[in-house]
Image (cartoon, rainbow, N blue to C red):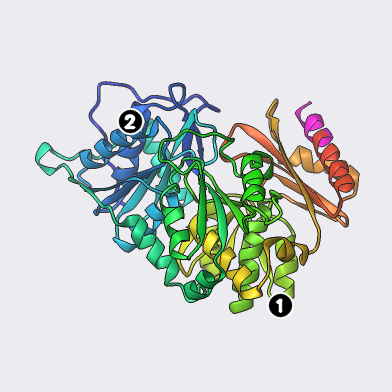
Amino acid sequence: MKKPAKRKSERPSKEIEPGRLLFSVSGARGIVGESLDTDIVKRLVLAFASILPAGPIVMGRDTRPSGEALMQAAIGAVTATGHDCIDLGIAATPTVEMVVERHKAAGGVIVTASHNPIEWNALKFLDRRGIFIEKEAGDELFNAFQADRFVLAGESSKGKVRSYSNAARDHIEAILSLDIIDASRIRDRRFTVVLDCINGAGSVIAPDLLDALGARVIKLDCELDGNFHRDPEPRPENLSVLANRVKEEQADIGFAADPDADRLALVDNLGNAISEEYTLALGVDLVLANNPGPVVVNVSTSSIIDRIAESHGVQVSRTPVGEAHVVAKMLDCHAVIGGEGNGGIIYPELHPGRDAMLSMALILQLLTERKTSLRDQIDRYPPFVMHKEKAPKTGDFSAKKISRLIQGLKPDKIDTRDGVKALFSEGWFHLRLSNTEGIVRIISEAATEDKVQDLIKAARRILKESFN
């Protein structure tokens, strides 16, 4: 990456208040009008474009009302540095990633806060491979941003903007071309699917993919208007409307995406919203049955992945939470599949990034191959109960202090790769700082609800004591 020159500016560097604009492996995000505005977006993208090599930069966004103005600020910053901009407009995150890779772009910027509430927005930064930038590049970007150190082109050397309208079609064709997907067999099943895209970036591409797979698609919130009628995070407690509609329509399955369509949750054929952990589990089961090989997930993902991998004779590697960490390990060990338990499947045969549309195709393929329903397939797996909650960060989060307190519980193992995970013979709990919100995430898994609640209570107590 080229070294940025000092930007000529009379304005001093703008320091970001800690805890307001969040920087992490997931990019930079904040609340629009408070910690994020067009000026901050412009400066962030100027910093990013300044550290990239020559070549076009791909831009896309989700449907949030704040997205259009932030996107225009970002496009202006891209061209100001002399880079051309490939403008996809509203596009799913995996679509943008694939355009970066296939068009040999220098990088990409996605304006999306993913599963965060609608008042939030964010920037995701992609390298030339169409994956999240690595930590070193992120640090370089952040330092350039804080110092207002940008490379600006002269007036005659500014970049040009061009639109590309075939990105979604290319994405769908790439999914249908995968060896693991037998579109003809899926069409013969004539699935009835209820689809909830939360009026986000998947609202056109997802129905089009399902149409191509011969499904009868009943659409819920599949407009590109950015009106989120439920919590954006696709988790069972937020999918009651979808679950009821699956029952009413006697559908085979319900799909729920997040606003940028990189995560997917499911409702079974009986109208039960099931844990988002099953999305990855089903994908892993299908891929390993066809092509056994390494699997990579994060430390918070359900242990059901280990059980499924074991049944196919392969092992699972775990990383800190965050798509960037998972992808880096997958590329390093040539994993055949990976992802995160938040509903994100990563299948490198298509592209090394989470993809809700790919997930839909893989799950329909599994149900077709096994000649089964989603409910029957879920019932074949070992039972597990998982609980996820958020806790306010009321003090310093110290992994050392938390680990010391956990020792009193006599765990079988303590994992400190990302926060602190305590493993016991009957289950585990995990305490970690969120990459996307200023909170602590508490996650627990066990075979029964009673045991999960015992572990969650212990985790809450440990966290409270650590803050005291």
Find disc 2 in the rendering and name its residue.
69
**Residue named by callout 1:** 313
Residue at the spot x=68%, y=44% of the render? 236
**Disc 2 crowd, CA 10 A, few/some/many (<14, 14-19, 20+):** few
The magenta region covers 461-468
Residue 430 in the image: x percent, y percent?
74, 46
Element marked by disc 2: helix
Marks 2/1: CA–CA distance: 50 Å
Q: Does the segment drawn in magenta span residue 465? A: yes
Residue 362: percent from left, percent from top: 55, 66
* Spot occupied by residue 129 in the image (x, y as percentages of width and height): 39, 60
Indicate the quadrant containing the C terminus: top left, top right, bottom left or bottom right: top right
Amino acid beneath label 2? Ala
Q: Secondary structure at mark 1?
A: loop
Residue 402 among magenta residues:
no
Disc 1 residue crowd, few under 14, some 14–19, many 20+, Cα 10 Å:
few
Task: Using the image, determine if residue 335 lies above or below residue 250.
Answer: below
Residue 242 screen position, x and y as percent: 61, 44
Q: Is residue 100 visible?
A: no
The mark total stands at 2
Left or right of residue 4: residue 209: right
Q: Is residue 384 visible?
A: yes
Q: Amino acid at mark 1?
A: Gly
